[in-house]
Amino acid sequence: MENSFSDEYFMKKALQEAEIAFEKGEIPVGAVIVIDHKVIARSHNLTELLNDVTAHAEIQSITAAANFLGGKYLKDCTLYVTLEPCQMCAGALYWSQISKIVFGARDEQRGFLNLGTKLHPKTKVNHGILAEECAALMKLFFAEKRKQLNINK
């Protein structure tokens, strides 16, 4: 039986959010924030819907979790996100003082690791959780976008 509080369990919740984004035509990134084994925030990219380049899944989750907790710091919280955060999101996560970040697929071009963006010194990072599933959804999304562009030419 699967441990209901495993990283895989919560990453599956983030993947569900990414699938919602996919269905809306958003880049399929999903996120959940957890404290004491309870999801307190869930979100997905909303940049197209809101016409806002800052409406990444992580930013939406940070705001929702802070509202839930009644404060801006996310100590003792874990973010599960399907794609490695960009430097903008990593900066917001730095300021939130989140305790742990778990992400699925790497973003070799725009991810915070390759760009050298620092997180809060107390933030722990784990990656590669359901990475293949997370990456497959992204690849499918962009393959469909390219197909649509070729049809519209």
Image (tube, grey):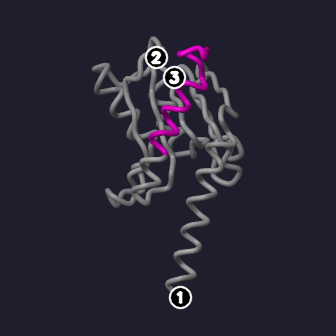
Real-space Cα separation, disc 2 to disc 1, in angstroms: 50 Å
Judged by depth in the image, the label closer to the viewer, 3 or 2, is: 3
Q: Could you say which disc has been placed on residue 16 in the image?
A: none
The amino acid beneath tag 1 is: Lys
Q: Are marks 2 and 1 in contact (CB under 8 Å)?
A: no
For the N terminus, the quadrant is top right
The amino acid beneath tag 2 is: Lys
Judged by depth in the image, the label closer to the viewer, 2 or 1, is: 1
Query: What residue is rendered at 65% in x and 48% in y?
Result: 135
Q: Circle 3 sits on which residue?
A: 78
Residue 112 painted magenta: no
Q: Position of residue 132 (x, y in %)?
A: 69, 42
Residue 15 painted magenta: yes
Query: What residue is rendered at 36% in x and 57% in y?
Result: 52
The amino acid beneath tag 3 is: Thr
- Name above or below for residue 80 compared with residue 22: above
* Residue farthest along the front direction in this orientation: 1
Q: Position of residue 51 (x, y in %)?
A: 34, 61
Q: Position of residue 78 (x, y in %)?
A: 51, 22
Q: Circle 2 sits on which residue?
A: 75
Q: Quadrant of residue 105?
A: top right
Real-space Cα separation, disc 3 to disc 2, in angstroms: 9 Å
